[in-house]
């Protein structure tokens, strides 16, 4: 855990002189991480090669967040299954209105356009929302969150939801007792 915090500190919080020193030790950082996983019985580049190392590193990031270290991880794209399940709405001529536009590209809807409908009921040009969901896992308007294919990110999301639920139950209990 100390190593993960040190890596995070070097990359984001440390003064410039420390960041320069940390940059010189990137190879050492990889060696430390490889040694750590070898001690656990994992080869740093397992069956999936470099992706295996990346997955282990992301898992360490999630563990750090769960243990109170303030850091952010990259948001993965929405799952392929969730994207494929989105229904398509073909815009008819009588549906075209001045205020009906794609919130991603800001272009007004035209008759014959294909819009994807998200579970939150927001609609976007098919090509616009597909590009968006390759970079993010949420609706551009209301931030409705899609499932992802990233197991580590999903684990973190479940942990955060559980923490929110625990906090809500504690608040309800306190309000019922004192409130």
Image (cartoon, rainbow, N blue to C red):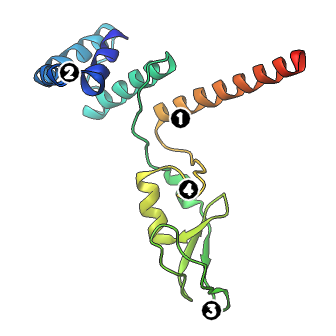
Q: Which residue was labeled with disc 2?
A: 30
Evaluate if marks 1 and 2 touch, with contact meaning CB atoms under 8 Å apart: no
Name the quarter where the C terminus is drawn: top right
3D distance between C-alphas at marks 3 and 1: 41 Å
Q: Which residue was labeled with disc 1?
A: 154
- Residue 80 image point, x, y percent: 49, 53
Element carrying mark 4 = loop
Evaluate if marks 2 and 3 touch, with contact meaning CB atoms under 8 Å apart: no
- Residue 10 image point, x, y percent: 24, 21
Element carrying mark 2 = helix
3D distance between C-alphas at marks 4 and 3: 26 Å
Taking the spot 71% from the left edge, 22% from the top edge, the residue there is 166
Residue 93: mark: 3
3D distance between C-alphas at marks 4 and 2: 36 Å
Sequence-first tag of 4 and 3: 3
How crowded pointer 2 is (Cα within 10 Å; few <14, some 14-19, many 20+) is rated as few
Q: Nearer the viewer, mark 2 or mark 3?
A: 3
Taking the spot 53% from the left edge, 35% from the top edge, the residue there is 154
Q: Which residue was labeled with disc 4?
A: 139
Q: Left or right: 104 with respect to 17?
A: right
Residue occupying the far left of the picture:
24
Q: Quadrant of residue 162?
A: top right
């Amino acid at each position: 855990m100390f190593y993960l915090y040190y890596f995070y500190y070097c990359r984001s919080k440390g003064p410039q002189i420390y960041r320069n020193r940390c940059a010189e030790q990137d190879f050492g950082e990889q060696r430390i991480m490889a040694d750590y996983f070898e001690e656990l019985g994992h080869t740093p580049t397992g069956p999936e090669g470099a992706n295996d190392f990346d997955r282990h590193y992301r898992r360490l990031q999630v563990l750090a967040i769960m243990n109170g270290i303030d850091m952010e991880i990259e948001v993965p794209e929405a799952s392929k299954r969730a994207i494929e399940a989105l229904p398509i709405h073909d815009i008819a001529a009588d549906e075209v209105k001045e205020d009906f536009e794609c919130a991603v590209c800001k272009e007004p809807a035209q008759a014959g356009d294909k819009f994807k409908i998200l579970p939150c009921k927001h609609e976007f040009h098919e090509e616009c929302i597909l590009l968006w969901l390759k970079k993010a896992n949420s609706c551009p308007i209301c931030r409705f969150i899609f499932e992802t294919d990233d197991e580590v990110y999903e684990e973190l999301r479940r942990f955060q939801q559980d923490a929110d639920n625990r906090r809500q139950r504690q608040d309800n209990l306190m309000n019922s007792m004192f409130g």
